[in-house]
Image (cartoon, rainbow, N blue to C red):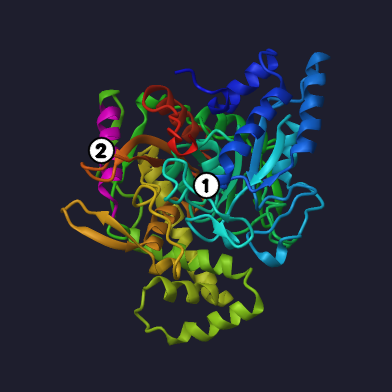
Amino acid sequence: MTLDIAFLPAHELARRLRRREVGALELLDHYLARVQRLNPRLNAVPVLDAERARERAHEADAALDRGVSWGPLHGVPMTVKESFNVAGLPTTYGYPAFAENRAKDDAVTVHRLKAAGAVVFGKTNVPVSLADWQSFNPVYGTTNNPWDLSRTPGGSSGGSAAALAAGLTGLELGSDIGASIRNPAHYCGVWGFKPTWGVVPQAGHELTPVPIADNFDIAAVGPLARSAFDLTLAMEVLCQPLTTYTPMGRVPLAWPTRGTPPRRCRVAIVSDDAQARVDAPVREALARLADFLRREGVAVSEEARPVDSAEAHAVYLHLLRAATGARFTDADFAAAQARAPRYAAGDTSYPARMDRGTTTGHREWVQVDQRRDLLRRQWAAFFERFDLLICPTATTPAFVQNQQGERWERLIPVRTADGRTLMQPTTDALFWAGYPGIVGLPACAVPLELAREDTSAALRLPVGAQIVGPAFGDMDVLAFARWLESEYRRFEPPALAWAA
């Protein structure tokens, strides 16, 4: 069966556009037609900017006719996560009160993508306040997973990953503080990259202009795609010029690469942890990956651990909620302040950690941040012994949509290594988000295989993992992801039987 051009990776689309094998307007209209046909049931792209995009695509064709190239993404149609400002389009974060909030300017990242020639034609769906591993909100409704419409595509960049997997867009831009790029990529069978903290500007990824927009703690901005090669291309665009945030402003950088060939890398694989037990399909996929790597001559350890996982999880949840709590309304913050003292001293439940972190004072924040610095040094020491770490992105494949109650009250089944089935809160999986995220490390979500929930299940769902590297080791992480794509697993589109 011939693959629909809509499923080609962005770098191949760009190549065909440069060679005039397809026109920019022709390609855009193909994507818009797919959105019109498939999006009513998928609901991944709730905001379209078709007419302005057609004008730009027409200009892109005319420029190529004159022999003029705008850049490496010349004419490539793409969408961006709803939380990025695009001049003239709404930015709501899923809040009804902001349904008419239209951005005056493009986010820095959107500007860079356009400057590289991209044709931005819409925005993709998110959960309210970007705070869920499902993507539903009262403004735009629920986004479904193209592999199974009853399941979540992940969050908060859920619309981004669903649109890519279903062939509704050529490239995507997401953000990640709690695996919001990596988790949807894992659930939908695509690639997603969370860069080293600070190398991609966050300005314009905001509901309203705020002073901390370019250095929001833990959060990062990065691409999602149908290929690791596209992630590399997008990072070259998003990081020009390459800088990083410091308290004194942005400073220029050059990528420090080890340049170790993939087959000579020293790789540690972690497939499970007591902080967040991992389901059988994910563990088994990682075991098969370990076998493949060893056959290819890669030095693999399945025993090494970079840090104490309980300490990493505690620090992550506290500082995560301190960061997100900074944007609470006065009423929500006051409610969290009232709840926080009611928890017992030893209560490590998610609500207790959330309210304590949200309402933490500066002195306590500094103390926890010092614990993070120790974790950062331990990770650095680990990467003296290993080039990369590979671990789960989430505890399970995509779970059935559940919008009832609070996130920590929603339970999903996990089949453990000793044969038990646990009902774990969905929030437990945040452990794998924060494992590298709390210290700002680069992490690339890669698809590994399609798995069945059990031996009798007919439905197969994507299963992936994340490749983690040392701080500013982004290019080495992406190089290994490209090698895995070429030698182990390429993109496979879902059957889309529901579209018939």
Is 492 covered by the magenta stretch? no
Q: As shown in the figure, which amino acid type bears the numbered disc 1?
A: Ile
Question: Within the image, what quadrant is residue 402 found in?
Answer: bottom left
Q: Is residue 75 at least partly visible in the picture?
A: yes
Say whether residue 304 is left or right of residue 384.
left
Q: As shown in the figure, which amino acid type bears the numbered disc 2?
A: Ala
Taking the view exactly as shown, the residue that stands out farthest to the front is 500
Taking depth in this image into account, of 467 and 88 the one nearest to the observer is 88
Q: Position of residue 283 (x, y in %)?
A: 27, 44
Say whether residue 148 is left or right of residue 48.
left
Quick one: SS at disc 1?
loop
Who's the residue at 73% across and 38% down the image?
Answer: 112
What residue span does the magenta drawing correspond to?
A: 277-294
Is 283 covered by the magenta stretch? yes
Taking depth in this image into account, of 353 and 45 the one nearest to the observer is 45
In the rendered image, the vertical position of residue 338 relative to residue 490, given as above or below = below
* Mark 2 neighbour density, 10 Å: few (under 14) some (14–19) many (20 or more): some
Residue carrying label 1: 181
Taking depth in this image into account, of 223 and 1 the one nearest to the observer is 1
Q: Is residue 223 at least partly visible in the picture?
A: no
Q: Quadrant of the N terminus?
A: top left
- Please report whichever mark, 1 or 2, sits nearer to the chain's N-terminal start: 1
Residue carrying label 2: 287
Q: Position of residue 219 (x, y in %)?
A: 57, 54
Taking depth in this image into account, of 262 and 21 the one nearest to the observer is 21
* Mark 1 neighbour density, 10 Å: few (under 14) some (14–19) many (20 or more): many
Who's the residue at 54% across and 25% down the image?
Answer: 8
Q: Position of residue 260 (x, y in %)?
A: 43, 27
